Image (cartoon, coloured by chain):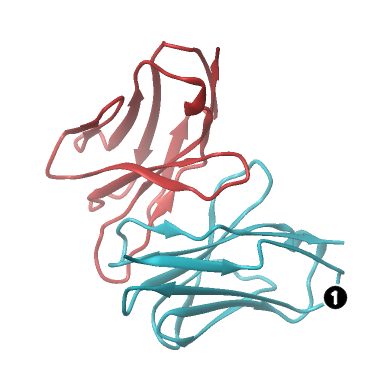
Chain colours: A red, B cyan
């Protein structure tokens, strides 16, 4: 089955700086890669996703890049703000019948004011 | 639009007592449904998933079971809770297998 590794487990940045979280996956057939943000005590919420037919996707201050050859994808947050502080999870799946998302172990991001 | 409801939000149960958590989805048909557990400060562990009524796949053998009696209803149960069952339980749904999952508000279960 799929195995997703996520690094770092914790990340602290100064407000205004950029943050990068990286994930690697094992199943070369995976083609869907979402990112979730979970604030303390809340549910995870989808913030951005990418499919294997593109290498990069951007939505305002967040972007995701995908390298299918190397089997890794990354979340980039620019101009970080205190409200970006949360736990971020990456995930991967084949997006096909019978499949389900495999999540990384999470990155706790702290943005220092 | 689709919404997912999960209740209760918090629950304190004694060891050995039964458990029933319910999740329902509105605004869609034949959703893929999932139960996840999250221990404090940890990641998301998939417990069960279902692609249709009566179809349940178990990811981790344990003290829990799941049922899907109706298309948009997913129930997590236990006959006798253990201390190790404490955690944050999240129900989720997706329109297609392996695609974006949308989570319910979660149930924080404390077994005492």
| Location of residue A12 (image quadrant) | top right
> In which quadrant of the rendered view does residue A25 lie?
top left
Residue at 30% across, 67% down:
B95
Q: Is residue A45 above or below residue B52?
A: above
Within the image, what quadrant is residue B88 found in? Answer: bottom right
Q: Chain of mark 1?
A: B
Residue at image location 24% in from the left, 65% down from the top: A96
Mark 1: secondary structure: loop
Question: Number of callouts in the render?
Answer: 1
Q: Quarter of the image containing the N terminus of chain B?
A: bottom left
Query: 10 Å neighbourhood of mark 1: few (<14), some, or many (≥20)?
Result: some
Judging by the rendered image, the residue that carries numbered circle 1 is B16
Q: Quadrant of the C terminus of chain B?
A: bottom right
For this view, does B94 lie left or right of residue B62?
left
Of the pair A69 and A78, the residue shown nearer to us: A78
Q: Residue at x 27, y 38 (%)?
A: A71
Residue furthest to the left in view is A53
Q: Position of residue A94 (x, y in %)?
A: 26, 57
Q: Nearer the viewer, residue B16 or B19?
A: B19
């Amino acid at each position: 089955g799929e195995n997703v590794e996520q690094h770092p487990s914790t990340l602290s940045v100064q407000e205004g700086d950029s943050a990068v979280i990286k994930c690697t996956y094992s199943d070369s057939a995976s083609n869907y890669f979402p990112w979730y943000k979970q604030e303390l005590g809340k549910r995870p919420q989808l913030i951005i996703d990418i499919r294997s037919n593109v290498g990069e996707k951007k939505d305002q201050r967040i972007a995701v890049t995908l390298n299918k050859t190397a089997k890794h994808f990354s979340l980039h947050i620019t101009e970080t703000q205190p409200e970006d502080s949360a736990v971020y999870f990456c995930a991967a799946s084949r997006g096909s019948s019978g499949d389900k998302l495999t999540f990384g172990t999470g990155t706790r991001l702290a943005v220092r004011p | 639009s689709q919404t997912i409801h999960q209740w209760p939000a918090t629950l304190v149960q004694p060891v050995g007592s039964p458990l029933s958590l319910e999740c329902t989805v509105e605004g869609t048909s034949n959703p893929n449904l999932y139960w996840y557990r999250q221990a404090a400060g940890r990641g998301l562990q998939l417990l069960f998933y279902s692609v249709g009524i009566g179809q349940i796949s178990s990811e981790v053998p344990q003290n829990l079971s799941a049922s899907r009696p109706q298309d948009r209803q997913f129930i997590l149960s236990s006959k006798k809770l253990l201390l190790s069952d404490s955690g944050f339980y999240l129900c989720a749904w997706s329109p297609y297998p392996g695609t974006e999952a949308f989570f319910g508000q979660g149930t924080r279960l404390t077994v005492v």
